C-alpha cells in the first residue's frame, strides 16, 4: 500500500513537471526583430513621439549628492580613481596612499585638487566614499511631487541616472549590494519615479554608464562588461523604459595601440538589440549614441560615421576618426549647434553650469535663467533637435527652489507658446539675427546663453510657420527670410491684438503689439498659402 502511494506521488509529480515544461514552452518569447549587427540596428526607426516631444528632463541623482560637489566627486576627490584608467579601489579616500609625490600631485591637480582639499577639510582625508551611502537617505523624496513639477514644466519625457560612474544603483538590482534598496534610502528610487511619471502621460527612461567606471576595479575587463550588460538588461526587464541613455560616446580606455576600446568590447550591439527586442513595442523605444564606436568598415562608411556626426570636431582628439555611432539619436553635450541637422539629435545641458549633480556651492545667480532656457529650447528645436535639461536633486530627495523656478517658468511659457515647439519641424532656414555661433557651458564656463534683439528662430507645421522672437525687438521687425512668402494671416500667440504687416523689398515688415505677451520669447504665427513655404524639412 505504501509503495503504491509512493508510485502515485511520483506519477503526479512527473505529470505536473511535464505540464510546467509545456506551459513554459508556450509562453510568448520576445520576437528577435533586431539582430546585434550594425545593419540591423541601423534599421530601427526613431519613434515619432521622440521627435515630437522636443523637451525632456534629465536627473542626476546619487550618493554624490551628499558631498554636493559634483557627480564626478569620487573621481575628482580620490587619486585612486582616474578617468580612462583602471580604478584602484575601493576604498576611495583623499589619501595619497602608496602613490609617489609626483603622481599624487598629478592626480590632484586643478579641479581634482580642489575636490581633494574639500574632502580633507570637510570629512577628513581617510573618510571613504562609501561612507556617504548611509547619509544618502532621500528621506524627503516625493516622486509624485517631482512628477507634478515635470508635467508642469511642459517636458514630455524624463531620464533618471539609474546608475552613474560611482556604480551605485537606484533600483533593487540583484547584481550588486550597492543599491538603494539594500543601502541608503532603502527604497526603489527608480521604480517609484517611473510609476509617477508614467501616470501623468510622460515617457520615462534611464541613464546607465556603458563605457566608463569611476568605482569598479574590474573595469574595463570582460567581467565588468558582463556585469554592466546584465545590469542594463535587468533595468529593461523590470521597468520597460521608453529611453535607454548610455554614456559615454567614445571609450576613455585605450587598447595597447592607443585606440579607444570599440563598441564590440562593451558588447553594445547585443545590449541594444536586447533592449529593442525585450520592449513591448520595439519600434516605440529609443536609445542614444553613447555606446562606444563601431569600427566595422560598413559602419565607418555609413551616415553614422563619427566624421559626419555632431561629434566630428572631437574625433581627432579622441583618436576616433575611424568609427561610427550606434543608437537612434545623437547627443551633443552642453552646447547647441549652428545648423539644421537631419539626423535625430538631443542636446543635454544642466541648469547648473558647474555640475550635473547637486552642487551646494553654486549660487542661484549662476543658474541658467528661465529666459535663457526658453531661448535655448527654441534655438535647438529650430534646428531639428530636442533639449534634455538637467536638474540635480539634493541627498534628502528635495529639488532646490531655483531649479523648480526655472522648470515652472518654462512650463508657463510653453503653455502659451507650445504649439510653436511640440510636433514642429525645421523650416528651410532655422532663423536669422546676430547670434549664429555655438554656445553652451563647455564653450563658456559661466554658462551664458545670451541671445539679442533681432534673433528669430523658425519652426514649422505644414503651412504654418512660427517666428519665435527670442528677445523683444521693439515696435517693429523685418524678417528678411520671409521675403515673398504668401501669407493668409499673421498673429501673435496669446494676443488678441491685430498685427499689421506688409511685404517690402527687404522682407516681411511686422508692426508688433505695443507690449510683449511674454516676458520671455514671443511667437508670431504665420498661416501661409498652401505650398508657399519651401518643402518641409524631414528628419
Image (cartoon, rainbow, N blue to C red):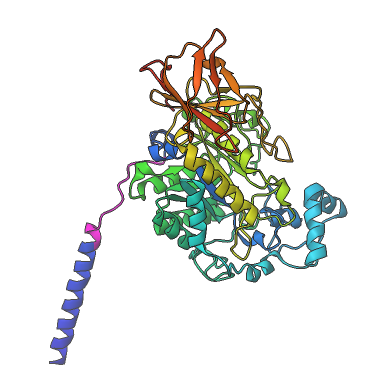
| Residue in view at x 66 percent, y 55 percent | 358
The magenta segment? 24-36
Residue 418 percent coordinates (x, y) = 47, 38
Residue 172 percent coordinates (x, y) = 49, 66
Residue 74 percent coordinates (x, y) = 70, 57
Q: Is residue 29 magenta?
A: yes
Q: Main secondary structure of the magenta part?
A: loop
The mark total stands at 0
Q: Does residue 13 appear in this view?
A: yes
Report the side of 6 relative to 426 (left or right).
Answer: left
Report the side of 92 relative to 389 (left or right).
Answer: right
Q: Is residue 85 magenta?
A: no
| Residue in view at x 75 percent, y 55 percent | 361
Report the side of 74 relative to 144 (left or right).
Answer: right
Q: Residue 320 is drawn in which quadrant?
A: top right
Q: Does residue 220 appear in this view?
A: no
Q: Residue 116 is drawn in which quadrant?
A: bottom right
Q: Residue 462 is drawn in which quadrant?
A: top left
Residue 146, placed above or below residue 460 = below
Pick the quarter of the image with the N terminus: bottom left
Residue 222 percent coordinates (x, y) = 55, 52
Pick the quarter of the image with the C terminus: top left
Amino acid at each position: 500500500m505504501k509503495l503504491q502511494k509512493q508510485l502515485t506521488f511520483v506519477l503526479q509529480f512527473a505529470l505536473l513537471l511535464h505540464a510546467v515544461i509545456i506551459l513554459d514552452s508556450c509562453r510568448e518569447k520576445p520576437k528577435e526583430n533586431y539582430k546585434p549587427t550594425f545593419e540591423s540596428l541601423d534599421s530601427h526607426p526613431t519613434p515619432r513621439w521622440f521627435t515630437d516631444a522636443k523637451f525632456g528632463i534629465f536627473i542626476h541623482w546619487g550618493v554624490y549628492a551628499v558631498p554636493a560637489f559634483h557627480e564626478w566627486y569620487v573621481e575628482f576627490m580620490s587619486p585612486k580613481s582616474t578617468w580612462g584608467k583602471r580604478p584602484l579601489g575601493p576604498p576611495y579616500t583623499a589619501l595619497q596612499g602608496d602613490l609617489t609625490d609626483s603622481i599624487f600631485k598629478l592626480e590632484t591637480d586643478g579641479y581634482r585638487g580642489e575636490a581633494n582639499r574639500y574632502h580633507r577639510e570637510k570629512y577628513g582625508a581617510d573618510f571613504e566614499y562609501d561612507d556617504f551611502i548611509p547619509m544618502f537617505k532621500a528621506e524627503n523624496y516625493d516622486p509624485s511631487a517631482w512628477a507634478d513639477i515635470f508635467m508642469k514644466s511642459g517636458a514630455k519625457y524624463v531620464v533618471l541616472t539609474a546608475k552613474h560612474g560611482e556604480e551605485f544603483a537606484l533600483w533593487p538590482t540583484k547584481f550588486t549590494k550597492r543599491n538603494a534598496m539594500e543601502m541608503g534610502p532603502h527604497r526603489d528610487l527608480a521604480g517609484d519615479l517611473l510609476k509617477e511619471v508614467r501616470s501623468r502621460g510622460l515617457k520615462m527612461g534611464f541613464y546607465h554608464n556603458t563605457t566608463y567606471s569611476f568605482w569598479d576595479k574590474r573595469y574595463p575587463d570582460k567581467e565588468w562588461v558582463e556585469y554592466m550588460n546584465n545590469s542594463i538588461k535587468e533595468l529593461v526587464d523590470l521597468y520597460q523604459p521608453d529611453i535607454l541613455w548610455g554614456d559615454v560616446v567614445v571609450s576613455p580606455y585605450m587598447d595597447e595601440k592607443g585606440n579607444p576600446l570599440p563598441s564590440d568590447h562593451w558588447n553594445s550591439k547585443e545590449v541594444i538589440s536586447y533592449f529593442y527586442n525585450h520592449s513591448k513595442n520595439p519600434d516605440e523605444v529609443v536609445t542614444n549614441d553613447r555606446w562606444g564606436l563601431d569600427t566595422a568598415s560598413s559602419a565607418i562608411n555609413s551616415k553614422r560615421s563619427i566624421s559626419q556626426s555632431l561629434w566630428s570636431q572631437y574625433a581627432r582628439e579622441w583618436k576616433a576618426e575611424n568609427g561610427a555611432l550606434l543608437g537612434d539619436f545623437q547627443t551633443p553635450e552642453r552646447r547647441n549647434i549652428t545648423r539644421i541637422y537631419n539626423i535625430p539629435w538631443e542636446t543635454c545641458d544642466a541648469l547648473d553650469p558647474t555640475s550635473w549633480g547637486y552642487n551646494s556651492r553654486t549660487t542661484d545667480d549662476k543658474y541658467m535663467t528661465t529666459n535663457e532656457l526658453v531661448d535655448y529650447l527654441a534655438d535647438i528645436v529650430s534646428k531639428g533637435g530636442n533639449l534634455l535639461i538637467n536638474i540635480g536633486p539634493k541627498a534628502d530627495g528635495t529639488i532646490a527652489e531655483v531649479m523648480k523656478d526655472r522648470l515652472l517658468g518654462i512650463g508657463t511659457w510653453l503653455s502659451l507658446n507650445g504649439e510653436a515647439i511640440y510636433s514642429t519641424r525645421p523650416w528651410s532656414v532655422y532663423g536669422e539675427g546676430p547670434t549664429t555661433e555655438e554656445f553652451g557651458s563647455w564653450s563658456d564656463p559661466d554658462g551664458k546663453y545670451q541671445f539679442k534683439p533681432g534673433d528669430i528662430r523658425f519652426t514649422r507645421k505644414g503651412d504654418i510657420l512660427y517666428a519665435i522672437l527670442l528677445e523683444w525687438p521693439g515696435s517693429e521687425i523685418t524678417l528678411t527670410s520671409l521675403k515673398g512668402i504668401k501669407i493668409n494671416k499673421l498673429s501673435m500667440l496669446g494676443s488678441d491684438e491685430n498685427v499689421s504687416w506688409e511685404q517690402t523689398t527687404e522682407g516681411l515688415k511686422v508692426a508688433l503689439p505695443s507690449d510683449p505677451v511674454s516676458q520671455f520669447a514671443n511667437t508670431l504665427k504665420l498661416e501661409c498659402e498652401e505650398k508657399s513655404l519651401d518643402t518641409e524639412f524631414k528628419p
